[in-house]
Image (tube, rainbow, N blue to C red):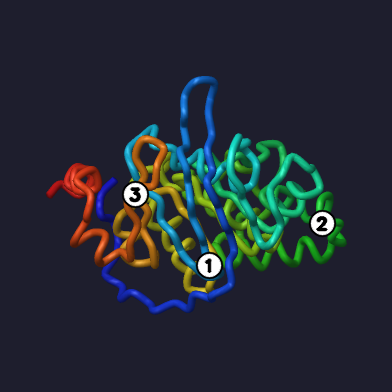
Amino acid sequence: MTETMTDAPRKNLQVSDEVAIEIQGMNKWYGQFHVLRDIDLTVYRGERIVICGPSGSGKSTLIRCINALEEHQKGAITVDGTKLTSDLKNIDTIRSEVGMCFQHFNLFPHLTILENCTLAPIHVRKTPKREAIETAMHYLEKVKIPDQAGKYPGQLSGGQQQRVAIARSLCMKPRIMLFDEPTSALDPEMIKEVLDTMIELAEEGMTMLCVTHEMGFARQVANRVIFMADGQIVEQNEPEEFFNNPKSERTQQFLSQILGH
């Protein structure tokens, strides 16, 4: 949860005025528990958004609602012009455009790294096997572990497995990537290699929403930081302003805990 990384200069990355994700008046309950309250959020193509906040604030639930891993009960979510409804066709359309990388890698232990990466393109996108393998090797190269293609997940370190999980998502050629605390299950020395991979993605203009406590990553990569508490978006701003001049007392309290000042 520390300010890991980053001496590298911030890059002024291009953000389009095209809307990638539109969330309006979104609410979600687990039984009586009101986990998300009146969420309004517009994400533009090429934006890199970091979502932070205390445990239980609804951060992970919010991004899981975007590709219907969680169902919202009220309000509207539109991804790439497709409205998220209970219609399975719409859900499939959205999931084909949105890649997701979880805290736990969720790789299939009985499949090799290459097979993990080619499974969905072959069976979901109906990509020819040779093309799927070429694409998989391209992305394994991109995350700097092409030499691990023939191994099984259990033979890799946690950082390597998380980079495979990112490559696997990229093999579906998504337009948007969602990251749910991708470094929180990793040892400190493995965190940087995963964050470096994510920085590279950001520099290529990938639209990203990332739930993380890595504030150094937020400073370097995000063009907007969102702070959530009690199921609501409390504050959002560009990183410089967010860290140096937080408006809400709740945000100030969180930052002083997490940054230790």
Question: How far apart, in angstroms, are the residues tagged by discs 1 and 3?
Answer: 18 Å
In terms of sequence position, does the residue under pointer 3 or pointer 2 come before the other?
2
> x, y percentage for residue 41?
49, 55
Q: Residues within 10 Å of mark 3 (few under 14, many from 20)?
A: many
Given this view, does label 1 or label 2 mark the residue nearer the observer?
1
**Numbered mark located on residue 44 in the image:** 1
Which of the 4 image quadrants contains residue 126? bottom right
Q: Which residue is mark 3?
A: 227
Viewer-side residue, 122 vs 223: 223
In terms of sequence position, does the residue under pointer 1 or pointer 2 come before the other?
1
Question: How far apart, in angstroms, are the residues tagged by discs 1 and 2?
Answer: 26 Å
Q: Is residue 132 left or right of residue 154?
A: right
Viewer-side residue, 177 vs 227: 227
Q: Quadrant of the N terminus?
A: top left
Amino acid type at image mark 3: Phe
The residue tagged with tag 2: helix, strand or loop? Answer: loop
Q: Which residue is mark 2?
A: 125
State whether residue 94 appears in this view: yes
Amino acid type at image mark 2: Arg
Mark 3 touches mark 2? (CB < 8 Å)? no
